[in-house]
Amino acid sequence: MATMDQIQRPLRAADPRYERWRWGIFALTWLVYAGYYLTRQSFAVAKVAFADDPNITMTREDYGIVDSSYLIAYAVGQFLWGSLGDRLGPKRILVAGMLLGIFASICSGFSTGLIAFAVFAVVQGMGQATGWPNVVKTMSSWFSLRERGRVVGVWCTHYAVGAVAALILAGYMMNLFGAPRPPGEEGSAIVPYWPAGFWGPAAVLGVILALVVVFLRNRPQDVGLPTIEEYRGEVESVLRAGDRPEDEIEGSWEVFAKVLRVPGVWYLAFSYFGIKLTRYALYFWGPKYISESLGSGAFGSGVMAAWLPFGGALGVIVSGCLSDKAFQSRRMPVTVLALVLTAALMMMGLRPIANRTFMCVFFFFIGFFLFGPDSIISATAAMDFGTKKAAATAAGIVNGVGSVGAILGGWLPGKITREDNWAPVFWVFVVGLLISAAILAPMWNTKPPTGDRGRTGPKPRT
């Protein structure tokens, strides 16, 4: 069979209308997924301030139960919403998901007990699960295989920037509506008003929801434009070698069944377990870890924890460009190497960190090396191996299995750590990341098959 570089179709001239639409979709889906993080991170910051509220008597393990309730619902939802996104179109699913997230966040601000927080965490998790498969599905229809590494690398800064904004916004809103701490009491100068950490982000997500309703389109054909492969002069990828694109009907149960039989999708899914465990443990427990290590308040801990996704935003861009340019659209070399480096950095967390500057640098570089593999596996490679016809299903499978790891990431730190000893959870990170790298190593040179058996033509635009 001819290689991807040999199999190309004739070029089309650049179309200004096409370019405006696809970069508009790029910007809108970027904003959408960044917005999802606003209501996702609220509980992580609010738990730092619960000690100041006598109405909340939850324990450390209770926090883990709430986080795990969210993550269980999120994992289940990935499998459900991914396949529905392929069948019904991503826009409908995204609108429903944002409405659920806003509702759950508002209700959480009125909660005080474990049961209420856990119930609304489940609702939040189901709403949040609509996001990833369906923004990935949308992007796969507007950007082609050969450009996805660098384009999706930049696009995947959304969850890094969204996490930074979420941590800072929640902490800021809590302090803005807080009250001065009475003289003689220990802690930060402000007693945070933690419900504002839920309500402020929900209001911002409501604005983004309105933009989606008005402007989002699922694919180029919805506005009278040709498919992305025709426009870019590329051959359409298929799920199985030897198949033809016209035989794979988008949204059909046959395509869904084919995705389940693609080995690459399952390699990605199982490797994502350890990666997502690590990232979500740092998301949900990072502010608490920093607060207990340095004695910082809710806002200061949130700002320092934000260095993790800040470093991640740069890391996803660098890794995406490297996968396209240095490795010719092979995604695994840069992924495996970055995972090994992340595991090595995690060894520094085995000893207490008592310096604020070093804590920020530590979180920055963990994010830089961890977020690149995360974005490649859950987005770029899921698009590649799931193809645009089943991208939501593939992304749902990968993210769903990974989210089982995230469930442990939400629960485990509360179970195995103490205020003065976080080393056990860092050992879990090291082992999990090395296992993920080992799972992906056999895919070092793997690319998805194409559906054009032998036709050649000029190379596409780059």
Image (spheres, rainbow, N blue to C red):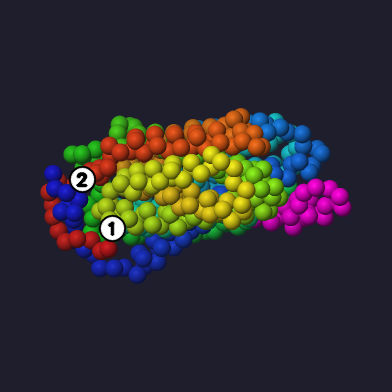
Q: Is residue 415 magenta?
A: no
Residue 399 location, quadrant = top left
Residue at the (42%, 54%) spot, across then down: 316
Residue 372 in the image, given as x and y percentages of width and height:
41, 50
Is 135 placed above or below 458 here? Answer: above
Considering the image in quadrants, where does the C terminus appear?
Answer: bottom left
Considering the image in quadrants, where does the N terminus appear?
Answer: top left
Q: Residue furthest bottom?
A: 16
Residue 324 location, quadrant = bottom left
Residue type beneath disc 2: Gly
**Residue to which mark 1 is pinned:** 325
Range of magenta residues: 169-192
Residue at the (24%, 44%) spot, across then down: 445
Q: Which tag is nearer the camera, tag 1 or tag 2?
A: 1
Residue type beneath disc 1: Lys
Q: Disc 1 to disc 2, how far (Cα)?
A: 23 Å
Residue at the (66%, 30%) spot, across then down: 61
Circle nearer the N terminus (1, 2): 1
**Residue to which mark 2 is pinned:** 451
User: Which secondary structure, mark 2?
Assistant: loop
Q: Looking at the image, which is closer to me, 429 or 152? A: 429
One can see residue 308 in this view: no
Checking the image for residue 345, the label placed there is: none
One can see residue 358 in this view: yes
Is 404 placed above or below 231 here? Answer: above
Residue count near mark 1 (Cα–Cα under 10 Å), binned few <14, some 14–19, many ≥20: some
Residue 5 in the image, given as x and y percentages of width and height:
19, 54
User: Which secondary structure, mark 1?
Assistant: helix
